[in-house]
Image (spheres, rainbow, N blue to C red):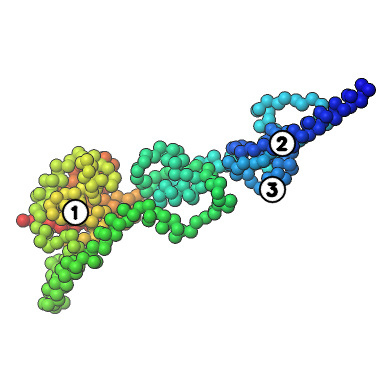
Amino acid sequence: MKKLYTLLLTLSLAAVTTHAAVKTVKHTIKNGETLYTIAHKNHTTIEEVRKLNGLKKGETLKLGRVLKVSQNTYFPDKKKNIVKVTKKSQKVKVAQKNKQKTIRIKKSAKIAKYTIKNGDTLFTIAHKHHTTIAEVKKANGLKRGERLKLGRVLKVPKNTYFPNKKKEVTAEITKKKLKIAAISKNKKKFLKAKKSVKKSVKNKRSNRILRTAINRHAISMPSKRIKRRLRTKYTMDDIFFKAAQPNIGFSKMNAKPTKITKLAKKKLGKRYVWGATGSNNTFDCSGLTTYVYKKNGINLPRRAIAQSKVGKRIARSQLRPGDLIFFDTSKGHRGYVNHVGIYIGNGKFIHASSAKKKVIITSLSKPFYSHRFKVARRFASAS
């Protein structure tokens, strides 16, 4: 009888344990986990985890995905005593046994270096690297509303954002979509640039001035010999650039150079800030020229390269105080204008220097600027 009771008791215990083993638990995938580690924690097999969740062989696990995991379904009969292994030894064994099965989640922690290009925004940079704007800001200590500078190198974390709703994340987006996204984010910047270009074409006054200027010069056409002599007096800049610019009217071309140079000298020592046009007494090179000329009734284009294409072109030997002088300060002399200053006489000019971080006066005979001189323009005639 005793044997019968013991047999019944063991059978009932076995039934209870099997019933308990059928229980499933929800498990959220974390960084560094594999099917082996999940199965090992819950005392089950990899095959059973795959069956419950419909996972295919070689399928990668996504962070945050919730899996159904059965508990207590695997107890090896051969091993009577289960050896307690420390956490460090477990990680080493898992890495050795599952090199082929490990998920590429550790790779997601990689940080790539990215150089900012024209048209880039935080959205496009984050989208390219499958991460979020907040993470890019954290990695680089960017503040809210901070401008991105061209050429700046950012640290960008890779593969840290996979939305749960989307099963398949598209690997690449066309360049057109990226451009549209950049334009929508930077509407204000693009509109300001477009307005300055469109005004020269759409403005009715500029068209009238252009017509009258052409007609005046077309009435009395000089002969070839006289035309050669008068080249210094009547240039293409006189006809087109002055007339086509609506902001630079002929009536305002009489601003005194002395006033321009005096106002410029008042800004000596003021701090250089890229993109500044006088706010908080800060300037960049073209910001200083636009500010000084605007105060004297002449509106110039914002950028140095655009300023170098308007007004009357003059020779270096004909420079007068108040004239604008343009330079190519790029490495290797790339051949384009990227710096501007105001000539103040005696072979000197005033400019906002990025190297000195302030507004300074420099000699034009200095080798660096003498060799890199590109062109000079005149907007104000001496009284």
Secondary structure of the residue carrying tag 1 is: strand
Q: CA distance from mark 3 to mark 2?
A: 18 Å
Residue 306 picture location, percent across and down = 26, 58
Residue 78 picture location, percent across and down = 83, 31
Q: Where, quadrant-wise, is the N terminus in this rendering? A: top right
Quick check: 134 left or right of 285?
right
User: Closer to the N terminus: mark 3 or mark 1?
Assistant: 3
Residue 368 picture location, percent across and down = 27, 47
Residue 347 is at least partly visible in this image: no
Q: Which residue is mark 1?
A: 324
Q: Amino acid at mark 2?
A: Lys
Q: Comparing marks 2 and 1, which lies closer to the viewer?
A: 2
Given contact means CB atoms under 8 Å apart, are the residues at marks 3 and 2 in contact?
no
Q: Which mark is residue 23?
A: 2
In the displayed orientation, state which residue is furthest to the left: 383
Q: Which residue is mark 3?
A: 54
Residue 72 drawn above or below residue 217: above
Q: CA distance from mark 2 to mark 1?
A: 83 Å
